[in-house]
Image: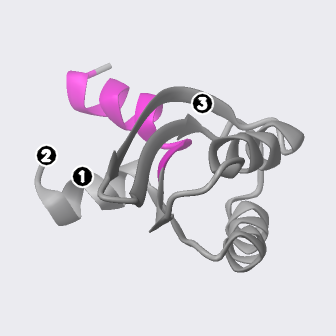
Amino acid sequence: MSDETTNANTTSNRAIVSVLGADRSGIVAAVAGLLAERNVNILDISQTILQGLFTMTTLVDLGDADFAEIHIGLDELAKQLGVQITIQREDVFKFMYRL
């Protein structure tokens, strides 16, 4: 198997979840909780707060979880929390940002 094929297989079920909004308690717990309920594994997480603006970027392994279902759940959670949450498949994210 070529390196390219191996890389495609290891990233095909991974996604990037990004959160942006006013800082408040419970954002990380709510997002992590929703992902855990859907058996999504957090592989890496980074967060920062800049002058009251909360940002979080998370690399997740979707496993067998339904991407569309997770997307809908995150949209609903974003409304509840008053933040912006996006999810993109890792390969799409990498292509868009040429990482």
User: In which quadrant of the rendered image does the N terminus lie?
Assistant: top left
| Frontmost residue, 2 versus 65 | 65
The residues bearing labels 2 and 1 have C-alpha atoms spaced at a distance of: 5 Å
Residue bearing the label numbered 3: 42
At x 68%, y 60%, the residue is 67
Q: Which residues are magenta?
A: 2-16
Q: Are marks 2 and 1 in contact (CB under 8 Å)?
A: yes
Residue 75: say if magenta: no
Secondary-structure class at tag 1: helix
Q: Residues within 10 Å of mark 2 (few under 14, many from 20)?
A: few
Q: Is residue 44 left or right of residue 82?
A: left
| Frontmost residue, 90 versus 72 | 72
Q: Are marks 3 and 2 in contact (CB under 8 Å)?
A: no
Q: Are marks 1 and 3 in contact (CB under 8 Å)?
A: no
Q: Residues within 10 Å of mark 3 (few under 14, many from 20)?
A: some
**Position of residue 79 measured from the top left corner of the image (x, y, whole percent):** 71, 80
Residue bearing the label numbered 2: 99
Q: Residue furthest right?
A: 37
The residues bearing labels 1 and 3 have C-alpha atoms spaced at a distance of: 18 Å
Q: Residues within 10 Å of mark 1 (few under 14, many from 20)?
A: few
Residue 4: say if magenta: yes
Residue bearing the label numbered 1: 94
Secondary-structure class at tag 3: strand
Q: Quadrant of residue 7?
A: top left
Which label belongs to residue 12? none
**Position of residue 14 measured from the top left corner of the image (x, y, whole percent):** 51, 41
Query: Mark 3 vs mark 2: which is more N-terminal?
Result: 3
- Residue kind at label 3, given as amino acid type: Ile
